[in-house]
Image (tube, helix red, strand yellow):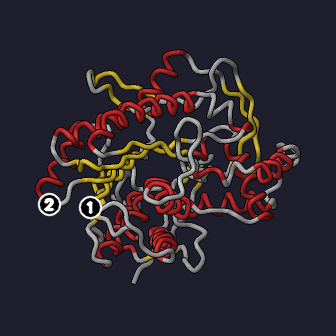
Amino acid sequence: MNRMQVAEKIVGNVSRSVNPFGLKAMMAQQIQTVRDRGTYAGAKCALILGGSASYGLGSRLTAAFGQGATTISVGYARPPHDDFLGAAGWWNQVYFKQAAERAGLIAQNFNANAFLPSTKQLIVDYVRQKLTTPIDLVVYSVAAPKRANPANPDEVWRSVIKPIGAAVTAASLDLAQERLIQQTIQPATPAEITATTHVMGGEDWERWLHALHTAGVLAPNCKTILFSYEGPQPTAAIYRDGTLGRAKRAAEASAQRLQRWMAPMGGEALISVNQSAVTKASAVIPGFSRYMLALLQAQRERGGHESTVAHQDRLFREMVYGQHRQVDARGRLRPDALEMAPALQAAVAQTLSTLTPATFTPTLPGYQLYRQAFRQLSGFAVPGVAATFDPMILNHVSY
């Protein structure tokens, strides 16, 4: 039987290849993480918007294998075709569905643009025609580079990752060249700030909830949650105080509006400030990878690193549906409290104080952890998984 060698390819901080078998093994590991913690009472029917990777996927994993919920996921990833093996998110959806159905759970995947009205109608039609239980959990975990104006589809808003007010110089990892490089990012224009807020804020989140309610497929006691990020001072200029942070403040305003609307029906709208994570999206945020390297190194030395799925399982198990909510003065859930602990942040600051392009070396433990986590997002560097596979696998998968 012919076998294909999978060539890993990283360009800058973007992975251009995928190992399906590695992703399958990673899916099994993540499912086991949830199963090891047992079951808990939660959602019966969960809609995950952005469920193909990262915190969206982690939310779907704990909903299905922790709560026993029916899960519907809207992802947007390129499928395999010709010599292209497909995007990691596409395979994540496939392997999740296979595992869920083996466990006797209903799992439906939609590979579609979550921003489009047609996608919202697609979900409404599916719930009406195929399910007997209304949606009682909506997770909004959409990270996208652009969104069309629903009132004028010819106008396209594009998000940018930039500071506000002044240029910022930050050091970031270059994974392809295995080095730390300095970048200067010019401040966003008012138009760019507005566009980023349209894309990454809470406008579409609100549209989803109202569309589902109007169609009669939303349970009165539905909970909905959007993930935010606060982070420490080293990432503040680019994230918390930049365009992404401005968009997250807009999302918090959306949460307040949704809460006022949903509370009389018995529902709830939540914002969760999640911990820093190695994701394909965060890898391209200027300065973030340097902080993440230092954080992983400090967690390795002190203990306490929490995987993305473990983080999400704790969030839903203890805070969304449990009795151990940690909230801040703005009413946001704070599962990131472990990362923001003063002692851990002091250790991170110590590493950052000496980490420059001149002192960086690929042998740093934090860099090795970061690189492994990044590679595993595409199915590489997974223990026990070889970089070869039977190409016939592409003919025996369904979405």
Identity of the residue drawn at 47% across and 60% down: 322
Report whether 24 appears left or right of 167: left
The amino acid marked with disc number 1 is: Gln
Measuring from the top left, give residue 51's x and y in whole percent. Answer: 39, 54
Quadrant of the image occupied by residue 372: bottom right
Using the image as rendered, state which of residue 26 and residue 222 is in the foreground. 222
Residue farthest toward the top in the current orientation of the protein: 190
Asked if 1 appears above or below 100 in the picture, the reply is below
The Cα–Cα distance between marks 1 and 2, rounded to whole angstroms, is 10 Å
Q: Is residue 372 visible?
A: yes
Disc 1 vs disc 2: Cβ atoms closer than 8 Å? yes
Q: Position of residue 335 (x, y in %)?
A: 58, 52
Give the image location of residue 250, x and y in percent: 47, 28
Q: Nearer the viewer, residue 41 or 285?
A: 41
Residue type pointed to by label 2:
Lys
Give the crowd class for mark 2: few <14, some 14-19, many >=20 residues within 10 Å. Answer: few
Residue 278 left/right relative to 6: right
Which residue is label 2 attached to? 130
Q: Quadrant of the C terminus?
A: bottom left
Residue at 77% x, 58% y: name it.
297
Q: Position of residue 11 (x, y in %)?
A: 59, 49
Is 234 displayed left or right of 129 in the figure?
A: right
Kindly state the secondary structure of the residue where label 2 is placed.
helix
Q: Determine which residue is flagged by label 1.
A: 108
